[in-house]
């Protein structure tokens, strides 16, 4: 053996290698530094809108701008995964919207989940006000009116045939998965439990109806501004007394569907669909394109303990009728949103803000006691 590397040295080297390979040796490696502990900020009240055509403040208004400007939501908090920042004011009101109309349709659920999972905030006792403009059923209300919802009904998951290819006794080609005709629930409720109101992933998200009633009672007399343009448009609704009224506050259900539908046929489908999935208890009032996605995201968050589903409010306002007035075609009337859109933006704020202010002003009560619900 040359080089001075004798038998003893070889044994020592082997022993050292055995030590390095042992679990005890691996545990002696430098530990990864622990992540800093974050104390989440409890959020009292948050307003969620859906789109702004530009900036949150200072330009043409969308669904969120009146909230951002009038409530001085001046502090800007970027959220990873969201197109617009979270905003808040000194009173503890938070607010957020998702983006412009060309981006919000495909990402509202993803952006909401990004907010819910942000470790900086604690939403377990938060009151949520989801608000936005909608198509309004002229049988129920006029353009500019505001409806507090008791259910959010999902209008995406269904079977569809071309209306020209269905039997003469069918009103349309839209019907529930698992059913054999429109107007019916799935025949096998065990196989299709996910599409029925069994406490699982229901087609109709039942909101806290006592809280919705409380919000309605506080705002039923709020005056929503009228205009000569709205008055002129209402005159065409002969035979529809509710559509001829100045804008008012009501209770009525929200139907969300990604399809932007319009016309008397689809309006009747919406009435029937809401009745079907609410057991005949709900009344279709407002249609939009995102409330079903947001309700689904909140349902998932509730199952994970991130939010309290009993503290969710949905307020929708009518920017246009869901069908044309007598004597006009659906094609002619589908884009009638000018004066109605402005009125709906205003109604979102005017009807929602008394509820928000009440919750914040008496947080010492409402933190542990949801209004409208008798304490146990």
Image: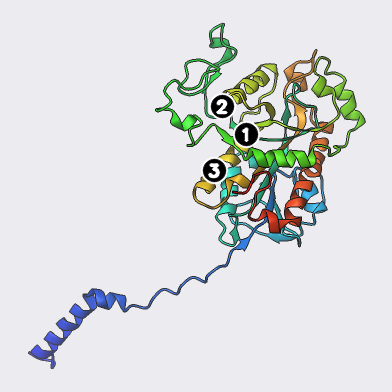
- Give the Cα distance between marks 2 and 3: 17 Å
Where is residue 31 shown, x and y percent of the image? Answer: 39, 76
Kindly identify which residue carries mark 2. Answer: 277
Mark 2 nearby-residue class (10 Å; few <14, some 14–19, many ≥20): many
Q: Residue placed farthest to the right in the image?
A: 228
Taking the spot 86% from the left edge, 24% from the top edge, the residue there is 233
User: How far is the residue under mark 3 from the one under mark 1?
Assistant: 13 Å
Residue behind mark 1: 151
Asked if labels 3 and 2 touch by Cβ distance under 8 angstroms, the answer is no
Of callouts 1 and 2, the N-terminal one: 1
User: Residue 53: horizontal and vertical position, in percent?
Assistant: 75, 43
Q: Position of residue 70 (x, y in %)?
A: 82, 52
Q: Is residue 262 above or below residue 344?
A: above
Q: Are marks 1 and 2 in contact (CB under 8 Å)?
A: yes
Residue 342, located in which quarter of the rendered image?
top right
Secondary structure beneath dot 3 equals helix
Q: Give the image quarter of residue 192.
A: top left
Q: Is residue 6 visible to the viewer in this orientation of the structure?
A: no
- Within 10 Å of disc 1 (Cα), the crowding (few <14, some 14-19, many 20+) is many
Secondary element type, mark 2: helix
Considering only order in the chain, which callout, 1 or 3, is on the residue closer to the N terminus?
Answer: 1
Q: 285 above or below 165? A: below
Residue holding disc 3: 299
Q: Residue at x 66, y 28 (%)?
A: 260
In depth, the one of 244 and 324 nearer the eye is: 244
The image quadrant that residue 325 belongs to is top right
Residue 189 percent across, percent down from the top left: 43, 26
Q: CA distance from mark 1 to mark 2?
A: 9 Å
């Amino acid at each position: 053996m040359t080089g001075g590397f004798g038998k003893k040295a070889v044994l020592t080297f082997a022993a050292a290698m055995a030590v390095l390979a042992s679990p005890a040796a691996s545990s002696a490696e430098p530990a990864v530094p622990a992540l800093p502990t974050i104390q989440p900020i409890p959020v009292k009240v948050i307003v969620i809108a859906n789109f702004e055509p530009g900036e949150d403040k200072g330009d043409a208004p969308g669904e969120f701008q009146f909230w951002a400007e009038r409530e001085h939501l001046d502090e800007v908090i970027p959220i990873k995964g969201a197109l617009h920042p979270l905003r808040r004011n000194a009173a503890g009101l938070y607010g957020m919207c998702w983006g412009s109309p060309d981006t919000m349709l495909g990402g509202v659920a993803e952006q909401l989940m990004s907010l819910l999972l942000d470790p900086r905030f604690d939403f377990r006792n938060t009151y949520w006000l989801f608000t936005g403009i909608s198509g309004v059923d002229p049988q129920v209300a006029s353009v500019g009116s505001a409806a507090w919802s008791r259910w959010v009904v999902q209008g995406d998951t269904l079977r569809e045939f071309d209306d020209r290819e269905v039997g003469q006794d069918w009103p349309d080609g839209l019907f529930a998965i698992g059913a054999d005709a429109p107007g019916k629930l799935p025949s096998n409720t065990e196989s299709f439990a996910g599409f029925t109101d069994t406490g699982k992933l229901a087609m109709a998200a039942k909101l806290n109806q006592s809280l919705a009633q409380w919000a309605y009672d506080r705002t039923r007399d709020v005056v929503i501004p009228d205009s000569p343009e709205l008055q002129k448009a209402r005159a065409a609704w002969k035979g529809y007394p509710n559509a001829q009224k100045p804008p008012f506050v009501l209770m009525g259900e929200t139907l969300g569907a990604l399809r932007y539908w319009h016309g008397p046929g689809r309006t009747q489908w919406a009435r029937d669909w809401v009745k079907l999935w609410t057991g005949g208890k709900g009344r279709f009032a407002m249609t939009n394109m995102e409330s079903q996605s947001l309700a689904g995201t909140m349902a998932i968050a509730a199952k994970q303990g991130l939010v309290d589903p009993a503290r969710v409010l949905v307020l929708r306002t009518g920017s246009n009728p869901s069908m044309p007035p007598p004597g006009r075609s659906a094609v002619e009337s589908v884009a009638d949103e000018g004066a109605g859109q402005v009125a709906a933006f205003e109604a979102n704020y005017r009807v929602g803000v008394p509820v928000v202010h009440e919750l914040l002003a008496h947080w010492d009560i409402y933190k542990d006691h949801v209004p409208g619900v008798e304490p146990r």
